[in-house]
Each structure stands twice: as structure tokens, then as C-alpha cells.
Image (spheres, rainbow, N blue to C red):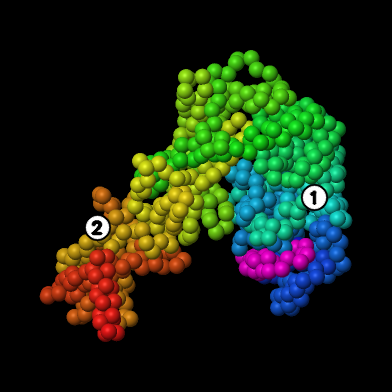
Amino acid sequence: MPVKVSVIVPVYNPGHYIDDCVDSLLRQSLPHDAYEVIFVDDGSTDATPAKLDAVAAEHDRVRVIHQENSGWSGKPRNVGIAAARGEFVMFVDNDDYLGDEALERMYDYGVAHGADVVIGKMAGKGRGVPVELFRINRPRASVENAPLIDSLTPHKMVRREFLERTGLRFPEGRRRLEDHVFVAEAFLRAANVSVLSDYVCYYHVRRDDSSNAGFQRFDPAGYFGNLCEALDVVERYTEPGAVRDRLYRRWLRNEMVERLRGQRFLAAPEDFRRDLFAQIHRVVVERFGPGVAEGLQPTQRVVAALAAAGRYDEVRAFAEWESGIALKAVPEEVSWADGTLRVGVSAEFTVHGEPLTFPADPPAERSAEPPLDVAASIDWVGADTTARFDRATLEVLLRERASSAVHFQPVEFTHERVPVGDGSRVRLVLRGTAALDGATAVDGAPPAGGLWDLDARVKLGGWTKGRRIGPARAAHRTLPPAGVVAGHVVLPYWTQPHGNLSLDVDRARKGLALDRAVPSCAGRRLEAGLPLYVPGRADVELRLTAVGSDTTLDVPGTLVPRAPGALLEAELPVGALGGREWRPSLNLAPKADEPRFHALPVRLRAGAGDGVEVVRGGRPGRLARLARRIGRVLRVRRVRR
């Protein structure tokens, strides 16, 4: 079979962090002869070279190229390109890993849409990844119609013919931002870029020791010299105007302004801060026209203006003010309706734990440019924020805890101005309700088994901040029961000790309250009212286990809605019960990867005639269990005496 994809992995002393990478590449759903993996060992001095050689000896689709250390990832990736045989090449870092179907899905998507570059949805495990880019699938994306420029890491699939035709390669040597130079040119020269957003393809991992190359402190002069090479690429392939300004804005915002804001700036040593500021000031003055900063949010515009003016002390003072600002997201009513978990939330910004307030009536005439005085700048941001409050947005994201993959949920929200004191200032509060459809919440599919967290994200006044939803006020701490929806058991719960709202899907052993059920039998029919939510009929599995034996009988059952919960119905195999007693347990999600049976608090036995009778409780109550335990302890003590 022709090689569809060549995976290129530059390797340098990854230690055990490469294990997940290797495993994920060997698990790919593409046929094993449809892809190859090329590890380019850049002079590693740990045990990795021997480990990779052993993998290659066992798997014929794996090759290892050893070379002397080149100093950075550019040359290893270029060596991999030269050795590749695939129709596409996929770049993966040695401490990251892929989703099991990533290569197959990205290849098929790229071929279907004639893409030169394919970007698969990313999840950041301790690292930031683009969010807006992956809101929807984008079969035909460009820098003009999509936020492609938000994704400048090299972890993409690129058509090899495109690389050969353009001669596009990574800059080599010990340098920063070689991926920005490569990816920016690829975006600007590709006939089409396709963005696959309905499957997490790439997991971007931060090492526990934070030794990833991107987290190491850099030399500002060298860093911003390399950054200017990426700006040169944009200048080479675009005309002056709105598109170029928007692309430049990405570097101004992410690599300059954000490095000068809040605690990120204040946490660095003073000498580094001053050196960083000087280099940013130089680039802003030399490379950016006024149209670049004009598209920033208000707080970002303040920092950009202060940087352009060379106002270091003011930048530091503004950072000190911003460092105290955080998002507060308080859960309100949480309830089930029509198979959907509805989550109310109110969100606002705080400063040092207290609500952040804004002028109630900002002046109609405001300066178009931010002032260079810090106090005046703060007032300018506040007035602008109040005036444009109707543009503020509240989003709710469902995040899988294990993978960190996020999924946007539908949310309706309102803007509320809450007067403070004499009414001259207001709190700006967003109140909304998110609708988590149990059948479609994760890219059109139900959430998989595991733990899921709910995050709120607010865009307001130049801040985009996210945080977990919680803790709840006393009036809203009651949660609805677990729901059996789309074949899965979804249990809302508060985390301990922080009290954030999370979901347990198919894994809960506690919290379902099935020990409160009171089953009854009428002939062969078992019925039990259960404290569960079901939007409609749901198939479940009843298991009968013979007391004193491992013998089991599995019986189909059904849950049907019945206020205030659900009714379990099952026809029992009376003839198979004999004269024995049986413990019933219930699997609420028969199609889940890991079946879980929850005991019901009764025992059953075939009765007279053709019926089944409830014999006695299958599990003693809590007080009875405690009394028995105390009795056993006392008996042991008497014997010892």
C-alpha cells in the first residue's frame, strides 16, 4: 500500500515522556502499512536512542535516524522531510501524543478537501492551545476567513508535494520560533488549509519538570530577532492593509503585550523584565503601524501604547493592577430537562477578591487612544468596558479531565448592570444558562466515561478569562439526581474541597442513591422506583447473583420516567431461580466500556406458584452495619481478656 502519512518526530533527551508518544503512534487506526514513523534522534545522550532502535526492530513502519546534535528542532524535521515517503507528513513533538484515529481522520479530511495543510483539534495538558480555531470544522480556511494565525506550532499535517514544490523547510540552528516562520509561510502559500475540529487529534503536553523547550527562559534580543523573521514572511506574502495588520497583531498580542501583563510580567527578575521591555519597544516602534494596535482589546491597547512610548514604569504599574483581576463563576440552578442538563451560572470579574466595578455612565466622548498615565488608563479601560458591555460574552465549556479536551456548549446569557453604593459605579454581571445535551455534548456525541469539568469563559474589557464553575451559594447547592441519557450515566457532583461543578460519566459507585430503592414483585415482574432522571425509556441490565455462590443470571430491564424519578421494570426468570436467594444488582449503562453493577437493597426468591418474592434487605442499613461492627469489636475484646 502506498504510504499515506509520514510522521516526523524530532527527538532530544525526552526520557520517559516519549513513551506516550510512541504508544500513540503505534496505536493509529490507519493500516500499519499506510503510514510510517520517522524518529530523528538529534544527538540524545539519554537512553532514548537504544529505546527507539528497539521499537524500530519490532515494527517495520518505524525508522530511526541518528545525527549529531544540531541545537534545535528545525534540522531534525528537515531531515525527516527528506526521508519521508508519505503523501503527507505529520509533525509531532517527542513529549506529545496523538489521538488513536488522528492520522486517519486528518488524512481523509485533507484529501477530501484538497488541503495542502491539515490542522487537527488540539488539547493542552498543562499548556495553552487555540480554542476559537477549533470551534467548528473549517474545510476551506485561510488567514482571511479563519483565526489560523492563532496556531503557529508545527503540529500539523502537510502535503509533501507542496513542500517539494515550494521548497519550504524549517530554519535550522539554535534559534527560537522556527515553527512560526515555517507555519506562517505554509498558511500564506497553501492552496487550501483544512481545520478538523470534531475529534481531538493532538495532545500538547507540558512536562512535570516544565523542561519543554517552549518553557525555557530565552534571550530577548535573540528571541525578537527570530520573531522578526516571521514578520518578514508576512511582509513578503501580503500587501499592506487590514490582512497584514491582523496577522502582525497576533505577534504583538501574544509575544509582546501578553508578556508585559499581570503576574506573568511581575514574576520575572527585574533585569530580565527591563531587557524584555526594551526589545519589545524596539520591535513595536520599528515594525508596526498604528493599524496593528488599533484592533487590540482595551487593556491590550494600553500595554501596547505604553510599550511604544517606552514607559517601563507605567507598564509595571499597570501589570500590578491587572495581576489582582480574576473571574468569578458562580453556579446557580442545575436541573435536567428533555435529556439536557441545564446549568445556570453568573459570572463577573473581581479584583483582589472583591467585585470589580466600572463607571455607571461613561462619558459619551472618550479619547480614541489610551492615555499614557496609569490611573487615566485604568479609567479609560473602565469607561470603554461599560460602554461596550453589550458585546461581552459568556461561554461554558465541557472539559474532559483526563485529556483536557474542551467542547463548547450552547449558552443563553444576559447582561446585568448592578448598581454599587450611590449608583455612580456598577458591577457588570453576565447571567446565563448552558444546555449540555447528554446525547450530543461532545462534538455531536455523548461524553465518554470519565470525569468532566465545567468551565466558564468571559470576554470583557480586553480580558478573556476562564475558570471552573463553582462553588455554589447555599441556595443553589442542591444538585439533581444522576441521569441515564443516551446510554450513559451522568452524575453531577461538587468536587472536594473546592466545590466546583463536575460530571461523573459511567464511573460512579457512590452518589446514585440506589440503596434507597424499594423494589417489589408482582408475579414475575420486578419493579423499583429509583432516584434517577431518564428522558425516556432506557435499556438496563439486571444481574442476579446466587447467595453463597458465583452463579449469575443476566436479565434485560427497562427504565421509564415516573415522577419523581424513574421506574425499573424487569421480567424475572422464575424457573431458573429454584429455591435459592438472589442478590439483584443493576447496570445502568450496558454499552459502557466498563460495566458497573450497583446493588439493590433486597434479596429475591422464587415464591409459591409462578411468582417471585422479596425476601429481605440485601444490605443492612448504616446503623445496623455500625451496630454489628461494634458488636464484633466488643466480642474480640472479651475474648482477649
Residue 529 numbered tag: 2
The residue at 12%/75% (across/down) is 608
* Quarter occupied by residue 72: bottom right
Classify the position of the C terminus by image quarter: bottom left
Pinpoint residue 318: horizontal percent, then vertical percent: 68, 32
In the image, is residue 30 part of the stretch drawn in magenta? yes
- Which mark's residue is nearer the viewer, 2 or 1? 1
- Going by the numbered disc 2, the residue's amino acid type is Gly
Question: Is residue 135 among the parts visible in the rendering?
Answer: yes
- What residue would you read off at disc 1? 218
Against 554, residue 249 (above or below) is above
Q: How many marks?
A: 2
Pinpoint residue 458: horizontal percent, then vertical percent: 55, 37
Q: Nearer the viewer, residue 116 or 373?
A: 373
Question: Which secondary structure, mark 2?
Answer: strand
Disc 1 residue crowd, few under 14, some 14–19, many 20+, Cα 10 Å: some
The residue at 61%/35% (across/down) is 463
In the image, is residue 203 part of the stretch drawn in magenta? no
> What span is colored magenta in the figure?
9-31
Looking at marks 2 and 1 on the same chain, the residue that comes earlier in the sequence is marked by 1
The single residue placed furthest to the left in the displayed view is 608
Classify the position of the N terminus by image quarter: bottom right
Q: Nearer the viewer, residue 85 or 14?
A: 14
Question: Which secondary structure, mark 1?
Answer: loop
The residue at 70%/41% (across/down) is 266
